[in-house]
């Protein structure tokens, strides 16, 4: 038996056909689960008794356990989920004035070992299934109801494009019109720069936004903190993103965490400007969230000098302060402290 939330609508229709159930019933089930938020098959009153019995015999609906839920002074909330096999993942809810964003995990651990990120500590364990990705959304949606989740970023634990099939199935379920019906423009996938799957995603989902972790404009520095740069160096990444930009018709977004004494010098800012001016782009400068790793946040004067150089060179940027710092809201921090 499988969790019924593991199926996209097309997959569920195909499964129903194999089970000799009417294909239109798959749409009814989607409506019950994702719009009405009813998952007890016996309560799906517009299904025949025989169909409900078959569903009970063929599918189940399960959710992860909330191991811990903590709220920051800035109203950011972090959830530590325990999965059926005991694995731990994190999800972060970020309320803002005009939207509420959910940051979702896609893997247990991460194999890419970025040196400033806690997600890879303890190594890579496994991919999340599509239902485990979707369940993060549904559990938190039910908890905050009647408030809505307006935006989703796949930016939690793991590299989303390393779990491409389950990621895209989750996207299909989230945007299905007769279900959750979340606009693709409200979805953002963060990546360390896996070029083949990045191009694949954009061709199949041109409205889903990409956010590319850069963190240095110098290859030698980027390789030190992001080993993936050995396989996909900056020049190749920028070349691929030019193609991405032509398909998506909107600027490419980069993420750049400011690390004191490493990537926050005037030279770093000038090189970043040179790289970014090669294509339509914007960069989110992120003040580093404290962690047990060997990096510190940049000083305020250094940040000011860095942004002044970008401004002078006509780079579009935003400066983001860490949300939920008092609850270890950066990726992997709560999971790491819990495991200890």
Image: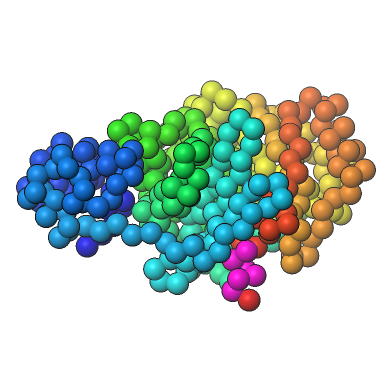
Residue 204 drawn above or below residue 334:
above
Residue 290 location in percent, x, y? Answer: 76, 58
Q: What residue is rendered at 22% in x and 37% in y? A: 27
Residue 16 location in percent, x, y? Answer: 14, 47
Left or right: 121 as drawn, with respect to 167: right
Residue 8 location in percent, x, y? Answer: 29, 44
Front-most of residues 277 and 182: 182
Q: What residue is rendered at 48% in x and 49% in y? A: 143
Q: How is the image coloured?
A: rainbow
Q: What residue is rendered at 86% in x and 39% in y? A: 306
**Residue sitting farthest toward the bottom:** 340
Residue 291 appears in the rendering: yes
Front-most of residues 128 and 210: 128
Residue 243 covered by magenta stretch:
no
What kind of secondary structure does the magenta stretch mostly adopt? helix
Residue 196 appears in the rendering: no
Left or right: 51 as drawn, with respect to 72: left
- First to last magenta residue range: 334-339
Q: Quadrant of the N terminus?
A: bottom left
Number of labels in the image equals: 0
Q: What residue is rendered at 86% in x and 33% in y? A: 309
Residue 110 location in percent, x, y? Answer: 55, 61
Residue 337 covered by magenta stretch:
yes
Residue 320 drawn above or below residue 128:
above
Q: Quadrant of the C terminus?
A: bottom right
Left or right: 86 as drawn, with respect to 92: left
């Amino acid at each position: 038996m499988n969790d019924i939330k593991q199926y996209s609508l097309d997959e569920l229709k195909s499964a129903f056909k194999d089970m000799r159930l009417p294909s239109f019933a798959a749409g009814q089930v989607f409506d019950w689960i994702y719009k009405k938020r009813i998952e007890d098959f016996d309560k799906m009153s517009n299904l025949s008794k025989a169909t409900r019995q078959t569903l009970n015999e063929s599918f189940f609906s399960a959710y992860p356990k909330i191991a811990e839920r903590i709220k920051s002074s800035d109203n950011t909330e972090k959830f530590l989920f325990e999965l059926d096999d005991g694995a731990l993942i994190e999800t972060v809810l970020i309320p803002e004035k005009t939207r509420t964003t959910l940051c979702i995990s896609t893997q247990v651990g991460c194999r890419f070992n970025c040196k400033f990120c806690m997600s890879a500590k303890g190594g890579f364990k496994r991919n999340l299934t599509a239902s485990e990705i979707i369940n993060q959304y549904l559990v938190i949606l039910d908890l905050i109801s009647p408030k809505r989740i307006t935006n989703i970023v796949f930016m939690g634990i793991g590299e989303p494009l390393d779990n491409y099939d389950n990621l895209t199935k989750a996207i299909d379920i989230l945007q299905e019109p007769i279900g959750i019906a979340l606009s693709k423009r409200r979805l953002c996938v963060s990546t360390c720069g896996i070029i083949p799957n990045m191009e694949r995603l954009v061709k199949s989902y041109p409205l889903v936004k990409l956010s590319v972790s850069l963190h240095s404009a110098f290859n030698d520095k980027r390789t030190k903190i992001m080993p993936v740069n050995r396989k996909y160096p900056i020049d190749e990444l920028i070349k691929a993103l030019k193609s991405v930009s032509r398909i998506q018709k909107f600027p490419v977004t980069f993420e750049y965490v400011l690390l004191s004494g490493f990537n926050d010098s005037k030279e770093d800012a000038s090189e970043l400007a040179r790289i970014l001016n090669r294509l339509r782009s914007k960069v989110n400068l992120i003040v580093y969230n404290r962690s047990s790793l060997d990096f510190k946040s940049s000083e305020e004067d250094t940040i000011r000098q860095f942004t002044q150089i970008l401004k002078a060179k006509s780079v579009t940027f935003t400066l983001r302060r860490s949300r939920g710092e008092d609850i270890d809201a950066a990726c992997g921090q709560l999971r790491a402290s819990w495991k200890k």
